Amino acid sequence: MRTHGWGGSPPAGDEEAILRIKNATHRCVAEHGGTTTIAHVAAALGISRQTVYRYFPSTEALLIAAALDGTQPFLARLARRLHPVTDPGEALVEAITYTIHQIPAEPYLRLLLDAGRGHSLLRSVTSQPARDIGRTLLEQTAVAWDASGIGPKQMDELIEWTLRTIQSFLIDPGDPERTETELRGFLRRWLAPGVIAAAVSGITDDSPVVS
C-alpha cells in the first residue's frame, strides 16, 4: 500500500483504504454524477490513479461497488414500506412502483438501472449486481414465497421479470407518464394477477402444454 498522498494521513490498511476510496466516490458522484471517473476520486483523495487501481480495476468496478453501498438507504426505506405486504402480486406492484418513482432522487439507483434516461453502469439488467438488487427488493416483504408456490427457480424468474419491467418503464415511461397512483393501479390490473396465477398453478418450464 502506498503511503504518500491521502491528505497527509495514509490509511492504516487495505480495508480503510477501500472505505476512504468509496467515501470519496460518494462525494464525487454527488458532484459529477455518472461522469465520475477514477481520476476524480484520486484527485479528491490526493493520491494517484494507480493507487485507486490497486483496489478497483476500472471506473465501472469502482462505481458499482460504491453504488451497491449507496443504494442501502433506499433499500432500507423500501424494506419498511414492504414489511407488512404478504400478497405476492401486491409485493411486486409496490416494489416496482416505488423503485421507478424513487429513481430520480436516487443517484446510485439511476446509475445502476436507468439506461433509459442516462448512463447505466450495468451491461445488462439481468447481470448479477442487478439480480442482487432485484432479490433484495423482493426479500424486503413479509411474503412467504415458498408457501405461496414460488420456489427458488420461480423466484429467479420473478426477479428477472421485476428487473425487465422496471427497465421497460424507464426506457419508455409513457406519454403522458403515469403518476405513482396510476402506475400502481396499472400494475395491479395487469401484472399482479399473473404473479398470483403462476404461484397458485405452480407453472414451470416442465409443465405440460394445454392444447
Image (spheres, rainbow, N blue to C red):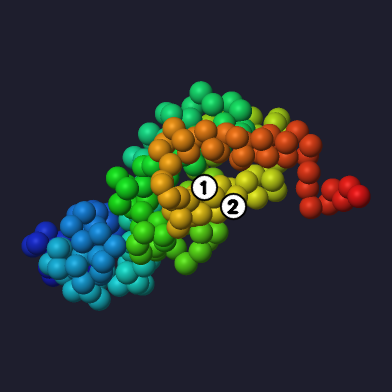
Residue at 51% x, 23% y is 84
Q: On the rendered image, what quadrant is the N terminus found in? A: bottom left
Category of crowding for the residue at label 1, using alpha-carbon neighbours closer than 10 angstroms: few (below 14), some (14–19), many (at least 20) = many
Is the C-beta separation of discs 1 and 2 under 8 Å?
Answer: yes
Residue 193 seen in this snapshot: yes
Specify the amino acid type for callout 1. Answer: Gly
**Disc 2 packing (10 Å; few <14; some 14–19; many ≥20):** some
Q: What element carries label 1?
A: helix
Q: Where is residue 79 in the image (x, y as percent from the top left)?
A: 44, 33
- Residue 198 image point, x, y percent: 73, 40
Q: What x and y, as percent, mark residue 91?
A: 55, 33
Q: Going 70% across and 31% down the picture, which residue do you hit?
A: 148
Tell me: 27 left or right of 140. Answer: left
Residue at 65% from the left image edge and 50% from the top image edge: 157
From this view, report whether residue 17 is shown above or below residue 53. Answer: above
Q: What element carries label 2?
A: helix
* Residue 143 in view: no
Q: Kindly identify which numbered label has been placed on residue 134.
A: 1
Q: Residue furthest bottom?
A: 50
Residue at the limit of the structure toward the left, as seen here: 8
The dot on residue 160 is 2
Residue 151 higher or lower than 206, as above or below: above
